[in-house]
């Protein structure tokens, strides 16, 4: 840009050439002047606020007050959101504690060894002593930590639910295994396996174990289950079968009388019959069988497992 200057004193017309650089410098100078003027006005207004007219002073106070009100509103809204989030997390923690106590009971952990009511111990060096620096959290950082902790609580709660379901299933299965001795006697008269048949004298497979006891001695269920057979059998005499689920059944034969009916639900240790000598029998005893998918198993394996569990439980109780 070129500017031509004319004046009577000038013998010749003078011209001034303005480049982009000159225009930029002018613009920067103008902006600086505006900023300096604004700062000067603010300084004068604050320093002479008491001498200003009441309307001007009230406008300034209202402007600063509205700014403080907006800050207070922002803080209150954020605090309300965080308080609501903390309430949700508190409810999740209570549910997680309840789940933990149930899982603790299912797993057999003593309450004295792991108490969910006690806070875990924590510690460490002070940041200023180990060379690291510390700073206060901002509201956004604190909100992010709350959200992250909430997600962790949800995931761990789901995990604890799965663990509880698995432990409960295993406990139910273990309770349905025939591990309790059906008769309170110290020995069995005949074991599982090949033996000489007492009637024919020939070698024959004995598919259970025999407990010899006087007629009328109580017979109890080796595990909980449902009665599926309660009838007289030409070979087994008065015979009772209990289904324990998972294709596991127990058979009680040669009884003098049966105390339950088909369809009854029995619990472990419940009296279900009395010892007798009905059917193909040489004397009063209980013929006890354990079958899985119809195949006879050695009952001593199950009874020995129950005895070991009782020993472990007694040691844990001490």
Image (spheres, rainbow, N blue to C red):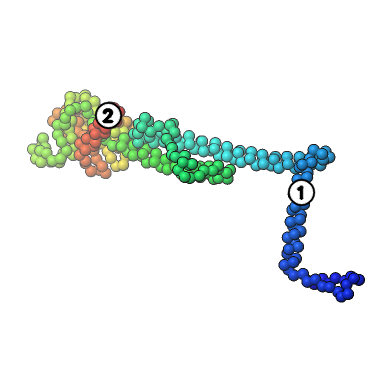
Q: Is residue 121 left or right of residue 297?
A: right
From this viewpoint, is residue 269 visible?
no
In the orientation shown, which residue stands out farthest toward the bottom? Answer: 12
For residue 247, the mark is: none
- Side (left or right) of 76 relative to 259: right
- Tell me which residue sits at (45%, 43%) in the image: 130
The residue to which callout 2 is attached is 314
At 67% from the left and 41% from the top, the residue drawn is 71
Is residue 87 visible to us here?
yes
Residue 52 in the image: x percent, y percent? 82, 40
Residue 86 in percent (x, y) is at 54, 37
Q: Which SS class for mark 1?
A: helix
Q: Nearer the viewer, residue 4 or 236?
A: 4
User: x and y percent of residue 133 in the render?
Assistant: 50, 44
Which one is nearer the viewer's eye here, 246 or 309? 309
Within 10 Å of disc 2 (Cα), the crowding (few <14, some 14-19, many 20+) is: few
Circles 1 and 2, Cβ within 8 Å, touching? The answer is no
Left or right side of 298 for 54: right
Q: Report the residue at 26% width, 44% height from top.
A: 293
**Left or right: where does residue 271 sit relative to residue 50?**
left
Foreground residue, 222 or 257?
A: 222
- Pointer 1 residue: 40
SS of the residue under disc 2: helix
């Amino acid at each position: 840009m070129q500017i031509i200057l004319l004046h009577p004193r000038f013998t010749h017309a003078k011209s001034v050439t303005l480049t982009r650089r000159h225009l930029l410098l002018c613009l920067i100078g103008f902006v600086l002047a505006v900023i300096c003027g604004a700062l000067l006005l603010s300084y004068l207004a604050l320093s002479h606020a008491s001498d200003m007219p009441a309307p001007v002073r009230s406008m300034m106070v209202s402007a600063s007050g509205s700014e403080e009100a907006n800050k207070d509103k922002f803080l209150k809204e954020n605090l309300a959101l965080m308080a609501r989030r903390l309430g949700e997390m508190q409810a999740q923690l209570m549910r997680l504690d309840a789940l933990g106590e149930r899982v603790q009971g299912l797993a057999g952990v003593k309450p004295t060894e792991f108490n969910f009511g006690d806070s875990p111990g924590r510690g460490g060096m002070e940041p200023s002593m180990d060379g690291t620096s510390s700073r206060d959290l901002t509201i956004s950082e604190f909100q992010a930590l709350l959200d992250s902790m909430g997600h962790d609580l949800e995931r761990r709660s789901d995990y604890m639910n799965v663990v509880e379901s698995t432990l409960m299933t295993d406990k139910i299965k273990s309770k349905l295994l025939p591990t309790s001795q059906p008769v309170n006697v110290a020995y069995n008269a005949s074991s599982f396996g090949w033996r000489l048949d007492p009637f024919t004298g020939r070698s024959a497979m004995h598919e259970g174990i025999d407990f010899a006891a006087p007629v009328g001695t109580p017979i109890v269920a080796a595990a909980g289950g449902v009665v599926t057979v309660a009838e007289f059998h030409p070979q087994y005499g008065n015979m009772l079968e209990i289904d324990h689920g998972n294709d596991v059944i127990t058979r009680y034969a040669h009884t003098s009388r049966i105390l339950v009916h088909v369809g009854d639900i029995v619990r472990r240790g419940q009296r279900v019959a009395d010892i007798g000598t009905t059917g193909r029998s040489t004397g009063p005893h209980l013929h006890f069988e354990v079958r899985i998918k119809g195949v006879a198993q050695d009952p001593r394996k199950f009874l020995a497992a129950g005895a070991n569990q009782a020993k472990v439980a007694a040691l844990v109780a001490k």
